[in-house]
Amino acid sequence: MHPLVISDPKPTVETGPAPALRRGLAVLRLLASRPSPVSAGAIARDLGLPRSTTYELLTELAAAGFAVHLPAERRWGLGVGAFEIGTAYLRSEPLERLSRPILTRLAGITRATAHLGVLHGSQMLYLAKEKPAGPSVTLVTDVGIRLPAALTATGLSILAMLPSGQVRALFPERSSFVDRTGRGPANLPDLRSRLAQVRRAGWAQEDCQITAGAASVAAAVFDHNAMPIAAIGITVAHRCPEPASMTPTCNFEHLVEPVTLAVGALTAAIGGRSR
Protein backbone atom coordinates (compact mmCIF):
# COMPACT_ATOMS: atom_id res chain seq x y z
CA MET A 1 0.00 0.00 0.00
CA HIS A 2 1.24 3.54 0.60
CA PRO A 3 3.24 4.98 3.51
CA LEU A 4 0.82 7.87 4.11
CA VAL A 5 -2.33 5.76 3.83
CA ILE A 6 -2.66 3.60 6.92
CA SER A 7 -3.82 0.11 6.12
CA ASP A 8 -6.89 -0.93 8.09
CA PRO A 9 -9.18 -3.78 7.05
CA LYS A 10 -12.16 -2.03 8.66
CA PRO A 11 -11.70 1.75 8.39
CA THR A 12 -14.20 3.73 10.41
CA VAL A 13 -15.84 7.06 9.61
CA GLU A 14 -15.39 9.25 12.65
CA THR A 15 -17.49 12.27 13.50
CA GLY A 16 -15.85 15.67 13.62
CA PRO A 17 -15.77 19.19 12.19
CA ALA A 18 -14.99 18.00 8.64
CA PRO A 19 -17.20 14.96 7.99
CA ALA A 20 -16.75 14.98 4.21
CA LEU A 21 -12.97 14.98 4.57
CA ARG A 22 -13.10 12.19 7.15
CA ARG A 23 -15.33 10.11 4.90
CA GLY A 24 -13.05 10.66 1.91
CA LEU A 25 -10.01 9.63 3.92
CA ALA A 26 -11.86 6.56 5.18
CA VAL A 27 -12.57 5.55 1.57
CA LEU A 28 -8.89 6.00 0.70
CA ARG A 29 -7.82 3.92 3.69
CA LEU A 30 -10.20 1.15 2.70
CA LEU A 31 -8.97 1.14 -0.92
CA ALA A 32 -5.38 1.02 0.35
CA SER A 33 -6.14 -1.95 2.60
CA ARG A 34 -7.48 -4.15 -0.20
CA PRO A 35 -5.22 -6.16 -2.54
CA SER A 36 -7.54 -5.54 -5.52
CA PRO A 37 -10.20 -3.03 -6.64
CA VAL A 38 -13.47 -2.94 -4.65
CA SER A 39 -17.09 -2.35 -5.65
CA ALA A 40 -18.84 0.81 -4.48
CA GLY A 41 -21.41 -1.37 -2.73
CA ALA A 42 -18.73 -3.10 -0.68
CA ILE A 43 -17.20 0.24 0.26
CA ALA A 44 -20.58 1.60 1.36
CA ARG A 45 -21.28 -1.53 3.40
CA ASP A 46 -17.90 -1.67 5.12
CA LEU A 47 -17.92 2.03 6.00
CA GLY A 48 -21.58 2.23 6.88
CA LEU A 49 -22.22 4.96 4.30
CA PRO A 50 -25.23 5.55 2.06
CA ARG A 51 -24.55 4.42 -1.50
CA SER A 52 -25.26 7.89 -2.86
CA THR A 53 -22.65 9.39 -0.53
CA THR A 54 -20.15 6.70 -1.45
CA TYR A 55 -20.54 7.38 -5.17
CA GLU A 56 -20.14 11.12 -4.58
CA LEU A 57 -16.93 10.57 -2.60
CA LEU A 58 -15.51 8.17 -5.18
CA THR A 59 -16.34 10.57 -8.02
CA GLU A 60 -14.54 13.42 -6.28
CA LEU A 61 -11.55 11.25 -5.43
CA ALA A 62 -11.33 10.07 -9.04
CA ALA A 63 -11.51 13.66 -10.33
CA ALA A 64 -8.53 14.51 -8.12
CA GLY A 65 -6.60 11.42 -9.23
CA PHE A 66 -6.80 9.59 -5.90
CA ALA A 67 -9.15 6.86 -7.10
CA VAL A 68 -9.73 5.16 -10.43
CA HIS A 69 -12.94 3.59 -11.74
CA LEU A 70 -12.74 0.33 -13.68
CA PRO A 71 -16.05 0.30 -15.60
CA ALA A 72 -15.65 -3.21 -17.02
CA GLU A 73 -15.24 -4.62 -13.51
CA ARG A 74 -17.59 -2.15 -11.77
CA ARG A 75 -14.93 -1.63 -9.15
CA TRP A 76 -12.76 1.13 -7.74
CA GLY A 77 -9.07 1.20 -6.88
CA LEU A 78 -6.38 3.66 -5.81
CA GLY A 79 -5.41 6.27 -8.38
CA VAL A 80 -2.04 7.68 -9.36
CA GLY A 81 -2.42 10.60 -6.96
CA ALA A 82 -2.53 8.28 -3.95
CA PHE A 83 0.58 6.46 -5.13
CA GLU A 84 2.50 9.72 -5.66
CA ILE A 85 1.64 11.04 -2.20
CA GLY A 86 2.53 7.71 -0.65
CA THR A 87 5.93 7.57 -2.29
CA ALA A 88 6.63 11.25 -1.56
CA TYR A 89 7.45 10.43 2.07
CA LEU A 90 10.14 7.91 1.21
CA ARG A 91 11.22 9.90 -1.83
CA SER A 92 12.83 12.38 0.51
CA GLU A 93 16.04 12.07 2.49
CA PRO A 94 15.36 8.83 4.46
CA LEU A 95 15.17 6.63 1.37
CA GLU A 96 18.05 8.37 -0.36
CA ARG A 97 20.25 8.32 2.74
CA LEU A 98 19.61 4.65 3.45
CA SER A 99 20.31 3.69 -0.15
CA ARG A 100 23.70 5.39 -0.46
CA PRO A 101 25.93 2.73 1.17
CA ILE A 102 23.93 0.00 -0.55
CA LEU A 103 24.38 1.59 -3.97
CA THR A 104 28.08 2.20 -3.31
CA ARG A 105 28.57 -1.46 -2.41
CA LEU A 106 26.54 -2.60 -5.44
CA ALA A 107 28.56 -0.42 -7.82
CA GLY A 108 31.79 -1.77 -6.38
CA ILE A 109 30.76 -5.42 -6.63
CA THR A 110 29.36 -5.21 -10.17
CA ARG A 111 31.67 -2.49 -11.52
CA ALA A 112 28.51 -0.95 -12.96
CA THR A 113 26.67 2.30 -12.30
CA ALA A 114 24.01 1.78 -9.61
CA HIS A 115 20.95 4.00 -9.23
CA LEU A 116 17.78 4.38 -7.18
CA GLY A 117 14.52 5.63 -8.67
CA VAL A 118 10.87 6.11 -7.73
CA LEU A 119 7.77 6.15 -9.90
CA HIS A 120 6.42 9.64 -10.53
CA GLY A 121 3.31 9.33 -12.66
CA SER A 122 4.37 7.43 -15.78
CA GLN A 123 8.01 8.44 -15.34
CA MET A 124 10.92 7.32 -13.19
CA LEU A 125 12.51 9.99 -11.02
CA TYR A 126 16.11 9.18 -10.08
CA LEU A 127 17.12 10.02 -6.51
CA ALA A 128 20.60 8.57 -6.14
CA LYS A 129 23.42 7.33 -8.34
CA GLU A 130 26.79 5.75 -7.57
CA LYS A 131 29.54 5.06 -10.10
CA PRO A 132 32.19 2.36 -9.79
CA ALA A 133 35.85 3.22 -9.57
CA GLY A 134 37.43 3.65 -12.98
CA PRO A 135 35.73 4.22 -16.34
CA SER A 136 31.98 3.59 -16.65
CA VAL A 137 29.25 3.94 -19.22
CA THR A 138 27.86 7.47 -19.67
CA LEU A 139 24.23 7.55 -18.56
CA VAL A 140 21.26 9.90 -18.60
CA THR A 141 20.06 8.64 -15.19
CA ASP A 142 21.52 11.51 -13.17
CA VAL A 143 19.90 12.52 -9.89
CA GLY A 144 16.72 14.51 -10.58
CA ILE A 145 16.35 13.18 -14.13
CA ARG A 146 12.99 11.70 -15.19
CA LEU A 147 12.68 8.98 -17.83
CA PRO A 148 9.73 7.04 -19.28
CA ALA A 149 8.96 4.26 -16.79
CA ALA A 150 7.89 1.79 -19.48
CA LEU A 151 11.37 1.96 -21.05
CA THR A 152 13.54 1.62 -17.96
CA ALA A 153 14.36 -1.52 -16.01
CA THR A 154 13.66 0.33 -12.76
CA GLY A 155 10.28 1.47 -14.07
CA LEU A 156 9.30 -1.96 -15.37
CA SER A 157 10.22 -3.57 -12.05
CA ILE A 158 7.82 -1.26 -10.19
CA LEU A 159 5.00 -1.31 -12.76
CA ALA A 160 5.00 -5.11 -12.75
CA MET A 161 4.10 -5.13 -9.06
CA LEU A 162 1.24 -2.62 -9.28
CA PRO A 163 -2.45 -3.52 -9.73
CA SER A 164 -3.44 -3.77 -13.39
CA GLY A 165 -5.96 -0.95 -12.95
CA GLN A 166 -3.25 1.40 -11.77
CA VAL A 167 -1.04 0.53 -14.73
CA ARG A 168 -3.98 1.18 -17.06
CA ALA A 169 -4.54 4.57 -15.40
CA LEU A 170 -0.89 5.48 -15.99
CA PHE A 171 -0.98 4.43 -19.65
CA PRO A 172 -4.57 5.04 -20.82
CA GLU A 173 -3.84 5.33 -24.55
CA ARG A 174 -1.24 4.72 -27.23
CA SER A 175 0.04 8.28 -27.00
CA SER A 176 1.06 7.56 -23.38
CA PHE A 177 4.02 5.53 -24.67
CA VAL A 178 7.33 7.15 -25.56
CA ASP A 179 9.78 5.73 -28.10
CA ARG A 180 13.51 6.48 -27.84
CA THR A 181 15.26 3.69 -29.74
CA GLY A 182 12.46 1.59 -31.27
CA ARG A 183 12.75 -1.17 -28.65
CA GLY A 184 10.22 -0.27 -25.96
CA PRO A 185 6.52 -1.20 -25.63
CA ALA A 186 4.26 0.73 -28.00
CA ASN A 187 0.90 -0.01 -26.42
CA LEU A 188 -0.77 -1.37 -23.28
CA PRO A 189 -1.01 -5.03 -24.39
CA ASP A 190 2.70 -5.01 -25.22
CA LEU A 191 3.52 -3.45 -21.85
CA ARG A 192 1.35 -5.97 -20.01
CA SER A 193 3.15 -8.82 -21.73
CA ARG A 194 6.51 -7.47 -20.63
CA LEU A 195 5.28 -6.84 -17.09
CA ALA A 196 4.04 -10.43 -16.85
CA GLN A 197 7.56 -11.61 -17.65
CA VAL A 198 8.99 -9.31 -14.97
CA ARG A 199 6.52 -10.62 -12.36
CA ARG A 200 7.49 -14.20 -13.13
CA ALA A 201 11.20 -13.45 -12.93
CA GLY A 202 11.09 -11.00 -10.02
CA TRP A 203 13.38 -8.56 -11.81
CA ALA A 204 13.45 -6.48 -15.00
CA GLN A 205 15.92 -5.77 -17.75
CA GLU A 206 16.15 -3.36 -20.65
CA ASP A 207 18.60 -3.39 -23.53
CA CYS A 208 19.14 -0.12 -25.43
CA GLN A 209 15.57 1.04 -24.78
CA ILE A 210 16.85 4.25 -23.17
CA THR A 211 20.36 4.62 -24.56
CA ALA A 212 22.01 2.80 -27.42
CA GLY A 213 24.97 0.83 -26.09
CA ALA A 214 23.67 0.39 -22.54
CA ALA A 215 21.62 -2.26 -20.74
CA SER A 216 20.13 -2.33 -17.25
CA VAL A 217 18.86 -4.79 -14.66
CA ALA A 218 16.62 -3.71 -11.78
CA ALA A 219 14.27 -4.95 -9.06
CA ALA A 220 11.65 -3.29 -6.88
CA VAL A 221 12.01 -2.17 -3.27
CA PHE A 222 8.93 -2.87 -1.12
CA ASP A 223 7.31 -1.09 1.82
CA HIS A 224 5.75 -2.64 4.94
CA ASN A 225 2.65 -3.62 2.96
CA ALA A 226 4.73 -5.35 0.26
CA MET A 227 3.93 -2.58 -2.24
CA PRO A 228 6.68 -1.26 -4.56
CA ILE A 229 7.92 2.19 -3.59
CA ALA A 230 11.25 2.36 -5.44
CA ALA A 231 13.68 0.34 -7.52
CA ILE A 232 17.41 -0.28 -7.57
CA GLY A 233 19.13 -0.91 -10.88
CA ILE A 234 22.56 -1.19 -12.44
CA THR A 235 23.56 -0.20 -15.95
CA VAL A 236 26.39 -1.64 -18.02
CA ALA A 237 27.79 -1.00 -21.46
CA HIS A 238 26.28 -3.44 -23.96
CA ARG A 239 25.54 -3.62 -27.66
CA CYS A 240 22.99 -6.18 -28.76
CA PRO A 241 23.77 -7.83 -32.11
CA GLU A 242 20.10 -7.65 -33.14
CA PRO A 243 18.70 -4.84 -35.28
CA ALA A 244 17.48 -1.90 -33.22
CA SER A 245 13.91 -2.44 -34.37
CA MET A 246 13.68 -5.90 -32.78
CA THR A 247 12.77 -6.73 -29.20
CA PRO A 248 16.06 -7.56 -27.43
CA THR A 249 16.64 -11.15 -26.38
CA CYS A 250 20.06 -10.81 -24.73
CA ASN A 251 20.32 -12.28 -21.27
CA PHE A 252 21.61 -10.47 -18.18
CA GLU A 253 20.91 -13.04 -15.47
CA HIS A 254 24.51 -12.87 -14.26
CA LEU A 255 23.75 -9.35 -12.97
CA VAL A 256 20.59 -10.27 -11.10
CA GLU A 257 21.90 -11.65 -7.79
CA PRO A 258 23.80 -8.53 -6.61
CA VAL A 259 20.82 -6.34 -7.56
CA THR A 260 18.30 -8.47 -5.67
CA LEU A 261 20.60 -8.58 -2.64
CA ALA A 262 20.81 -4.77 -2.69
CA VAL A 263 17.03 -4.52 -3.02
CA GLY A 264 16.58 -6.89 -0.09
CA ALA A 265 18.93 -4.80 2.02
CA LEU A 266 17.06 -1.55 1.32
CA THR A 267 13.67 -3.19 1.79
CA ALA A 268 14.82 -4.41 5.21
CA ALA A 269 16.33 -1.02 6.09
CA ILE A 270 12.97 0.76 5.62
CA GLY A 271 11.03 -1.94 7.45
CA GLY A 272 9.50 -3.34 4.27
CA ARG A 273 8.68 -6.89 3.28
CA SER A 274 9.15 -8.58 -0.07
CA ARG A 275 6.46 -10.54 -1.86
Image (cartoon, rainbow, N blue to C red):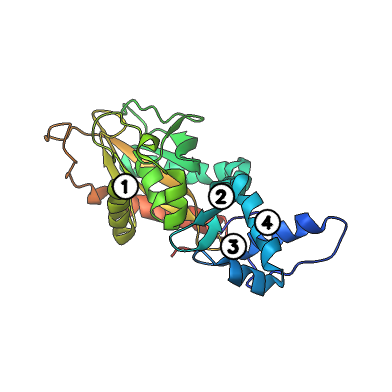
Where is residue 196? Give x, y as percent. Answer: 30, 57
Alpha carbon distance from label 2 to label 4:
18 Å
Residue drawn at x 40%, y 44% as measured from the top left = 155
Q: Nearer the viewer, mark 2 or mark 3?
A: 3
Q: Secondary structure at mark 4?
A: helix
Mark 2 residue element? helix
User: In the drawing, what numbered circle is on residue 83?
Assistant: 2
Mark 1 or mark 2: name the one nearer the start of the chain.
2
Indicate which disc residue 191 carries: 1
Q: Earlier in the sequence, mark 2 or mark 4?
A: 4
Q: To which residue does mark 3 refer?
A: 31
Task: Measure the C-alpha gap from mark 1 to mark 2.
Answer: 20 Å
Query: In terms of depth relative to the viewer, which is nearer, 112 or 50?
Result: 50
Q: Is residue 61 left or right of residue 210?
A: right
Gap between marks 1 and 4, in whole Å?
31 Å
Disc 3, SS: helix
Q: Are marks 1 and 2 in contact (CB under 8 Å)?
A: no
State the residue in front, 18 or 224. Answer: 18
Q: Residue at x 30, y 61 (%)?
A: 200
Disc 3 marks which amino acid?
Leu
Residue marked by disc 4:
57
Q: Is residue 193 above or below residue 274?
A: above
